[in-house]
Amino acid sequence: MKKIKKDIKIIRRKGLYYLMDENNRIKKYKPWLHSIFCFIYDRIMRESVFPKKFNGSYKRHIEILKREFKPVHKKEILEIGTGTGNLAKALQRDMFYTGLDISAGLLNIASSNFEKYCFPNIELFVADASDMPFKANSFDRAVCNLSLNFFPEKERFIKELSRVLKPGGVFFCSVPVPEKISKNARIKGNLLSEEDLKKLFQKYGFAFKPCNYENGALLYFYGRLFNLHYSQTNVVKFVDVGGFAGWMQATPH
Ligand SMILES: C[S@@+](CC[C@H](N)C(=O)[O-])C[C@H]1O[C@@H](n2cnc3c(N)ncnc32)[C@H](O)[C@@H]1O
């Protein structure tokens, strides 16, 4: 497979790719959600997490994703924390989609969903966001929906993201942030504020741009990766002149 790092051994089982350890055994990850609960994940998100924890709307969330991804065609896209593959509702069928998640149970559901929506180009990997098996400069786009707060090593993840994205590549993210959470809601995971996210992304060479969408506790934002020679001053200038318009459609340089 052309985008897998040298020396990484993988095996394909029932539509998913698994990584092998040094003893040639399939690498295991601590399950995020026990396999027996995977089939009710979508219902919990729709009927409990969105209305009760996020104080937001699942329908609106999907509409936002559709709006962002409708104009994007024929790009290599990586989704980190694929879950049950809800992004299939928003992506164009001509995209080259790679999904990554630590939960094989959820990825099995994602595999059926992508099949249901007739995607010809999909690959699903059971792997950790902070240690991705992909070669540098592999993807034009990356996306992470409702998952970033669950990654225990966020900084390692962002560093990995900056490695696997092509220079000029664009990242789109939806994540709950503490400043938007209503008083009584307790949201799982380790939440970072918009300001902290901005600092972390900028540290690894991204320009950071929040989107205007309002949906309860969720922040939607872009990160665009620049070439290393692109100075911080230039990044700021780029933001100031409104250079973010049409980010998802932009071509990596
Ligand atoms: C709330 S779900 C979101 C799933 C999906 N993106 C969606 O919008 O429905 C969080 C996802 O992050 C995954 N996840 C948690 N920690 C991870 C890690 N370290 N590496 C990769 N995926 C992880 C979980 O298995 C789960 O699928």
Image (cartoon, helix red, strand yellow):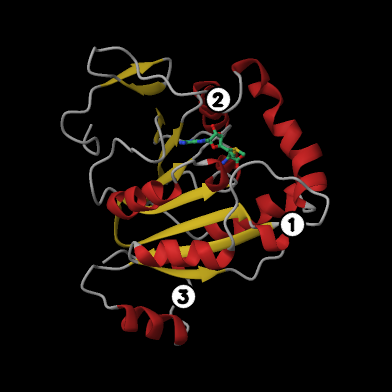
* Image: 182 above or below 100: below
Q: How many marks?
A: 3
Cα distance, mark 1 to mark 2? 33 Å
Question: Going 51% across and 33% down the picture, which residue do you hit?
Answer: 118
Residue beneath label 2, please?
112
Residue beneath label 1, please?
181
Quarter of the picture containing the C terminus is: bottom left
Cα distance, mark 3 to mark 1? 27 Å
Nearer mark to the viewer, of 3 and 1: 1
Cα distance, mark 2 to mark 3? 35 Å
Residue beneath label 3, please?
244
| Type of amino acid at the residue the image marks with label 3 | Phe
The reply to whether residue 141 is visible in this rendering is yes
Question: Going 40% across and 47% down the picture, which residue do you hit?
Answer: 157
Quarter of the picture containing the N terminus is: top left
Q: Please tell me which of labels 2 and 3 falls first in the chain.
A: 2
Q: Position of residue 86 (x, y in %)?
A: 60, 39
Nearer mark to the viewer, of 1 and 2: 1
The reply to whether residue 250 is visible in this rendering is no
- Helix, strand or loop under label 2: helix
* Image: 246 above or below 8: below
